[in-house]
């Protein structure tokens, strides 16, 4: 398989600072290992016996011919093992759910993908040189030229900003203001900030809280009813660990930047989310989107970026994510309809699992 480029977030030196220092997370590339592993057969041996760092828990989900298979192992936190229902932070995989929510509003006639987002925003307007020109679709595909690449989240004793403090880069937000600047040849520039504009859009159009609408319109209909954008899940959840093995203070960093990085989910939830995209592409009765919108979602706009998904045309759709203490990846093969998803609660461990998942 050709090399696939993933937009994963690097932890820099936060772990060394004990979780108290917030650095902007640089984007980095996964090797082809990620996608190759995603479509390997589930190994017969236990993943828990592989050479994976201590203190890591995992879930791995596969859908083949409509049949969901799930494996799990390791520790969710001290004294508690991971099971099929343990929730993990899935970081930027949140963006796929956000885009599906936007597309349900397009489906129902409340939005237009190619219209400027400021036409629909009521409480706040996207500023910057291209603020009035940035379209809904451009925000979904990271081609609107918006600022703020990623978010570091907040520790247990830090104040949480509201949505408009995040968008405006105002205290107590620890990220910069979201603005739409020039685009060089209309190119791709990964922007979690742009996804947060979509959160404001969904709330303004629906009159509902983001977490409420996404649960009602996307997560429950696709069968991922335990997945949630709440800050603190009610269900059992994993605690995160840095690559060094140091635990994340408080177990996890809190993400009020819900649309960009705040989803708690299982590996099977991620597999079901991609299954919903495939169902829409195949015009199945349970589809949540019409064929035309699903096709638009997986059509590359800038580089490999579709609308809330990355795309290798005709072959694979995927997204991945990294928060402090958690990694996640989900992918679907467009030729076979096979789906793979994995979540871990130690940064870097997912690549160790990938090694174990490669075909023998």
Image (cartoon, rainbow, N blue to C red):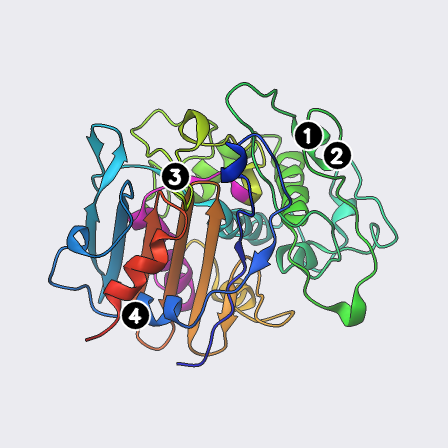
| Gap between marks 1 and 4 measured at Cα | 39 Å
N-term-proximal mark, 4 vs 3: 4
Packing grade of label 4 (10 A; few <14, some 14-19, many >=20) is some
Residue 241: image tag: 3
> Label 1 belongs to which residue?
173
Q: Are marks 2 and 1 in contact (CB under 8 Å)?
A: yes
Packing grade of label 2 (10 A; few <14, some 14-19, many >=20) is some
Magenta highlight range: 261-287
Packing grade of label 3 (10 A; few <14, some 14-19, many >=20) is many
Examine the image and state in which quarter residue 209 appears: top right
Q: Nearer the viewer, mark 2 or mark 3?
A: 3
> Label 2 belongs to which residue?
169
Q: Is residue 217 magenta?
A: no
N-term-proximal mark, 1 vs 3: 1
N-term-proximal mark, 4 vs 2: 4
Q: Left or right: where does residue 170 sit relative to residue 334? A: right
């Amino acid at each position: 398989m050709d090399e696939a480029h993933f937009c994963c977030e690097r932890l820099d030196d936060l772990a060394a600072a004990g979780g108290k220092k917030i650095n902007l997370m640089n984007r980095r590339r996964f090797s082809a290992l990620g996608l190759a592993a995603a479509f390997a057969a589930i190994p017969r041996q236990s993943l828990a016996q592989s050479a994976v760092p201590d203190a890591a828990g995992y879930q791995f989900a596969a859908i083949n011919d409509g049949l969901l298979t799930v494996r799990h192992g390791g520790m969710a936190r001290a004294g508690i093992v991971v099971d099929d229902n343990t929730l993990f932070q899935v970081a930027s995989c949140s963006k796929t759910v956000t885009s599906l929510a936007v597309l349900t509003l397009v489906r129902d006639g409340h939005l237009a993908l190619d219209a400027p987002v400021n036409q629909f925003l009521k409480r706040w307007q996207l500023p910057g040189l291209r603020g009035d020109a940035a379209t809904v679709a451009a925000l979904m595909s990271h081609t609107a030229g918006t600022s703020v690449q990623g978010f570091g989240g907040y520790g247990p004793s830090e104040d949480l900003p509201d949505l408009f403090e995040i968008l405006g880069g105002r205290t107590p937000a620890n990220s910069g203001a979201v603005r739409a600047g020039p685009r060089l040849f209309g190119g791709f520039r990964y922007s979690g900030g742009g996804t947060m504009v979509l959160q404001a859009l969904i709330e303004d159009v629906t009159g509902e809280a983001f977490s409420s609408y996404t649960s009602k319109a996307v997560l429950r209909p696709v069968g991922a009813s335990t997945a949630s954008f709440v800050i603190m899940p009610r269900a059992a959840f994993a605690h995160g660990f840095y690559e060094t093995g140091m635990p994340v203070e408080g177990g996890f960093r809190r993400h009020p930047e819900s649309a960009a990085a705040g989803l708690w989910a299982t590996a099977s939830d991620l597999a079901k989310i991609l299954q919903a995209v495939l169902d829409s592409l195949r015009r199945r009765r349970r589809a949540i989107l019409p064929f035309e919108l699903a096709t638009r979602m997986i059509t590359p706009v800038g580089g490999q970026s579709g609308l809330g998904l990355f795309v290798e045309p005709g072959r694979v759709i995927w997204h991945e994510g990294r928060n402090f203490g958690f990694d996640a990846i989900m992918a679907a093969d467009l030729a076979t309809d096979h789906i793979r998803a994995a979540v871990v609660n130690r940064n870097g461990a997912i690549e160790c699992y990938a090694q174990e998942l490669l075909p023998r």
